[in-house]
Image (cartoon, grey):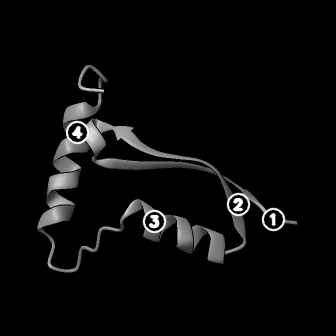
Amino acid sequence: MILHPFFHTFREINRVLARSYRSRFFSPEELRAMVEAAGFHVNLMHSRFFLGGLNFLVARRLD
């Protein structure tokens, strides 16, 4: 992802967010639990982007 054209922009935005006293970062397990509690099924989830600095998930709404 370092070669992504917006990598430096994403990194700077993340640094600004991380410095905020109101920031709260969720673990993958916490994020999955919140998504499932909202009525979705998580099909795919990983933290491989940006050297583990981005939680990625694909979810679908339960009928």
SS at badge 2: strand
| Percent x, y of residue 30 | 44, 71
Going from N to C along the chain, the mark reached first, 3 or 1, is 3
Residue that badge 4 annotates:
9
What is the crowding at mark 3: few (fewer than 14 residues within 10 Å), some, or many (at least 20)?
A: few
Residue that badge 2 annotates:
41
Tell me if 33 is positioned left or right of 61 in this view.
Answer: left
SS at badge 4: helix
The quadrant of the picture occupied by the C terminus is bottom right
Going from N to C along the chain, the mark reached first, 3 or 4, is 4
Residue that badge 3 annotates:
29
Q: Is residue 24 above or below residue 54?
A: below
Q: Residue at x 64, y 70 (%)?
A: 36
The quadrant of the picture occupied by the N terminus is top left
Q: CA distance from mark 3 to mark 4?
A: 27 Å
Depth order, front residue of 38/12: 38
